[in-house]
Image (tube, grey):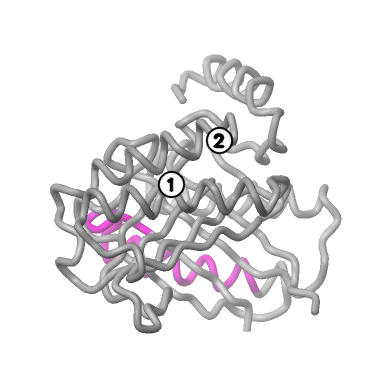
């Protein structure tokens, strides 16, 4: 499974949008990394998220790649990931932070 | 990014204290690293298994861009722990603070891959110019 962490502000994303995101993210992970996403969905409680010191509308979506990525491929995947989030939720481009991590090395 | 996550049992940190702590964390991060405030996110979680408390009252985890020294990170976290102590009344010894690195090239924010530390001004200028053409604001 592809590990996927989503961190969203309470009340910001509807149940329908969450379901669509879960489906979309799993398909994205399958296509990009060869396995569906195992999603850890974390909701930041109301009045508990801040960006630039002000109440936040930011969401974080972070996936672990199955192998180290060359930067052009990572950048293309990050754009695809953020576009998926924006198109599904209707949020601003400035309100999504995408992360694609290389596998941990020991 | 950076993303600071602060986990504690429910009601340990009041809703009134959170804005002050978030403002302090944002200010401290920017003063120490030179990063602009627009980059700094602070999220307070309650009883989250994502960030185990392991006997502490509060765990603060800073996920910051790679490129800062261990000394810089430790000094920054120490000031943030002081803010939690001052604003939430939590004993220093009950607060665990840590900072971990994420390479800037792994992150996209505002539709652009994140700048390396020290390259923020050029990144912001290019980003604002791009958004002004597309009709959005940063």
Chain designation of label 2: B
Crowd class of label 2 (few under 14; some 14 to 19; many from 20; radius 10 Å): few
Circle 1 sits on which residue? B79
Read off the residue under disc 2: B32
Q: Nearer the viewer, mark 2 or mark 1?
A: 1
Classify residue B94 by image quadrant.
bottom left
> Start and end of the magenta stretch?
A8-29
Magenta segment's dominant SS is helix
Do tag 2 and tag 1 residues touch (Cβ < 8 Å)?
A: yes
Using the image, name the chain to which the residue with label 1 belongs: B
Residue B78's spot in the image, x, y percent?
46, 52
Q: Secondary structure at mark 2?
A: helix
Residue A99 rendering spot, x and y as whole percentages: 61, 56
Helix or strand or loop: what does disc 1 sit on?
A: helix
- How much space separates mark 2 and mark 1, taking CA atoms? 10 Å
Looking at the image, which is closer to me, B21 or B89? B89
User: Does residue B62 sit above or below B72 in this rendering?
Assistant: below
Frontmost residue, B124 versus B63: B63
Circle 1 Cα neighbour tier, 10 Å, few/some/many (<14 / 14–19 / ≥20): some
Residue A89, percent across and down? 38, 51
Of B126 and A30, which appears nearest the observer? B126
Residue B96 shown in magenta: no
- Determine the residue positioned at 50% across, 33% down: B30
Residue positioned 35% across, 51% down in the render: B82
Q: Residue at x 64, y 37 (%)?
A: B112
Q: Is residue A15 magenta?
A: yes
x and y percent of residue B52 in the render?
41, 79
Position of the N terminus of chain A, as image quadrant, is bottom right
Which badge, 2 or 1, is on the more N-terminal residue? 2
Residue visible at 80% across and 75% down? Answer: A105
Q: Residue furthest right?
A: A70
Labels 2 and 1 in the same subunit: yes
């Amino acid at each position: 499974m592809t590990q996927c962490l989503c961190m969203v502000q309470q009340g910001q994303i509807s149940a329908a949008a969450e379901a669509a995101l879960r489906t979309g993210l799993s398909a994205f992970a399958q296509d990009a990394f060869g396995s569906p996403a195992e999603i850890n969905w974390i909701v930041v409680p109301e009045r508990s998220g801040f960006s630039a010191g002000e109440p936040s509308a930011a969401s974080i979506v972070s996936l672990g790649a199955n192998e180290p990525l060359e930067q052009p491929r990572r950048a293309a995947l990050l754009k695809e990931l953020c576009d998926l989030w924006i198109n599904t939720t209707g949020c601003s481009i400035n309100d999504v932070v995408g992360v694609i991590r290389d596998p941990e090395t020991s | 990014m950076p993303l600071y996550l602060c986990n504690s049992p429910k009601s340990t940190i009041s809703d009134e204290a959170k804005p002050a702590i978030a403002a302090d964390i944002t200010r401290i991060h920017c003063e120490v690293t030179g990063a602009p405030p627009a980059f700094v996110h602070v999220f307070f979680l309650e009883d989250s298994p994502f960030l185990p408390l392991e006997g502490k009252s509060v765990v603060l985890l800073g996920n910051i861009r790679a490129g800062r020294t261990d000394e810089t990170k430790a000094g920054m976290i120490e000031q943030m722990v002081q803010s939690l102590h001052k604003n939430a009344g939590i004993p220093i010894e009950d607060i665990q603070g840590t900072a971990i690195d994420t390479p800037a090239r792994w992150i996209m924010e505002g539709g652009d891959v994140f700048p390396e530390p020290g390259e923020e001004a050029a990144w912001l200028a290019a980003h604002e110019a791009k958004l002004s053409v597309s009709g959005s604001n940063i």
